[in-house]
Amino acid sequence: KRFREPKHERRPWRIWFLDTSKQAIGMLFIHFANVYLSDLTEEDPCSLYLINFLLDATLGMLLIYIGIRAVSSLVEWQQWDSLRFGEYG
């Protein structure tokens, strides 16, 4: 994906790695949560994964959006420049 970004807007390798590693950690957490839940229930693991994915893609994204907006407002109000989202220095 990094090479699909325009050259003048392309993120440095370090920042790209920080962004993608957060996604990978989230996917690993969901995977191991699904493995754990499938051992506790007699449900099909694939259906549990689908339910988890749909909840994460809808409610999870909504909660993340609300959280980011709230923290961004607090950071702007307190003028904490080092805590702005997307600015890695």
Image (cartoon, rainbow, N blue to C red):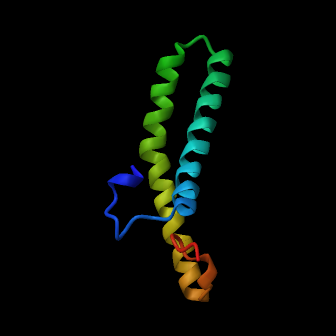
Image location of residue 49, percent across then percent down = 50, 26
Q: How far across and how far down the image is residue 84, in percent?
A: 55, 76
In the picture provided, is 60 more to the left or to the right than 80? left
Location of residue 43 by image quarter = top right
Residue 47 lies, in percent from the top left, at: 47, 20
| Placement of 4 over or under 56, stated as above or below | below
- Residue drawn at point x = 52 percent, y = 13 percent: 44
Residue in the picture at 34% in, 59% down = 5
| Residue nearest the observer in this picture, 85 or 63 | 85
Drawn side of residue 41 relative to residue 64, left or right: right
Of the pair 29 and 12, the residue shown nearer to us? 12
Count of numbered circles in the view: 0
Which residue lies at the image location 60% right of the left edge and 10% below the top edge?
Answer: 42
Counting from the top left corner in percent of width and height, residue 30 is at: 58, 35
Instruction: Give the vertical position of 75 relative to 38 (above or below).
Output: below
Name of the residue lying farthest toward the top: 42
In the picture, which quadrant includes the C terminus?
Answer: bottom right
Pick whichever, 17 or 60, lies toward us: 17
